[in-house]
Amino acid sequence: SQELEQSPQSLIVQEGKNLTINCTSSKTLYGLYWYKQKYGEGLIFLMMLQKGGEEKSHEKITAKLDEKKQQSSLHITASQPSHAGIYLCGADGTGGFKTIFGAGTRLFVKA
Amino acid sequence: KAGVTQTPRYLIKTRGQQVTLSCSPISGHRSVSWYQQTPGQGLQFLFEYFSETQRNKGNFPGRFSGRQFSNSRSEMNVSTLELGDSALYLCASSLGADATNEKLFFGSGTQLSVL
């Protein structure tokens, strides 16, 4: 079955700094999703990438998909306290699974 | 449009009991997926219902079951609760016409504690 590995597991950054979160798939990626979760709450959709080399941005968050490397990266520019939370990557599962998710990256932003 | 609504928000049960969780999807969405989230295992897919039929299923024991009604509302049932069932249960809805390449809309979850 497909697995998604995220790195780092957690991240503490100073407000204003840039950061990058990575998501690597054990199988070919045909599409990848990024979601954000506030602690104890549901997930909020950020963006979906479907083609190799595709790059999307939403406010100060940019995500790229590298199909050859079976990897996606999420980059936050000039981080703010509002960016704090858990970032999860997801992909459509195989073998009858709906969307599967990585373990998540916990982001803390120090003011 | 109202978002995905899950009830109850919090639940405390004891081992051996059973529990039913409810999920009302966004109006017009026909697919409802259920996930279990724990600190150790992360977000694990339970099952997906589309038009009252289970379309996809994860690797959970038969104690976990679900159903979907004609109005797309869904319920999830866990029988003979175990301590390890303590988790945040999330449901997500989507239009469902395409089983893949779909943005999921999540509810706030039901936090289940089994004592």
Image (tube, rainbow, N blue to C red):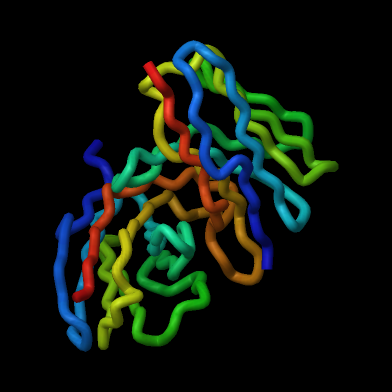
Q: Position of residue A109 (x, y in %)?
A: 43, 24
Q: Is residue B27 visible?
A: no
Q: Is residue B46 something one can see in this rendering?
A: yes
Find residue A47 and report its image quarter.
top right
Drawn side of residue A39 relative to residue A27, left or right:
left
**Whole-percent x and y of residue B78?**
28, 79
Which residue corresponds to the image point at 47% horizontal and 33% vertical from the top-left?
A107
Point 39% across, 40% down: residue: A37
Placement of B42 over or under A23, stated as above or below: below
At 44% across and 74% down in the image, what residue appears?
A: B54
Q: Position of residue A2 (x, y in %)?
A: 68, 62
Provide residue B107's location: percent of width, then percent of height.
29, 49
Describe residue B62's horizontal placement relative to residue A93 as left or right: left
Residue A14, compared with residue B115, is above or below; it is above
Is residue B108 rendered to the left or right of residue A97? Answer: left
Q: Where does the N terminus of chain A fall, quadrant-wise?
A: bottom right
Between B84 and A97, the one lying in front of the other is B84
Number of numbered callouts drawn: 0
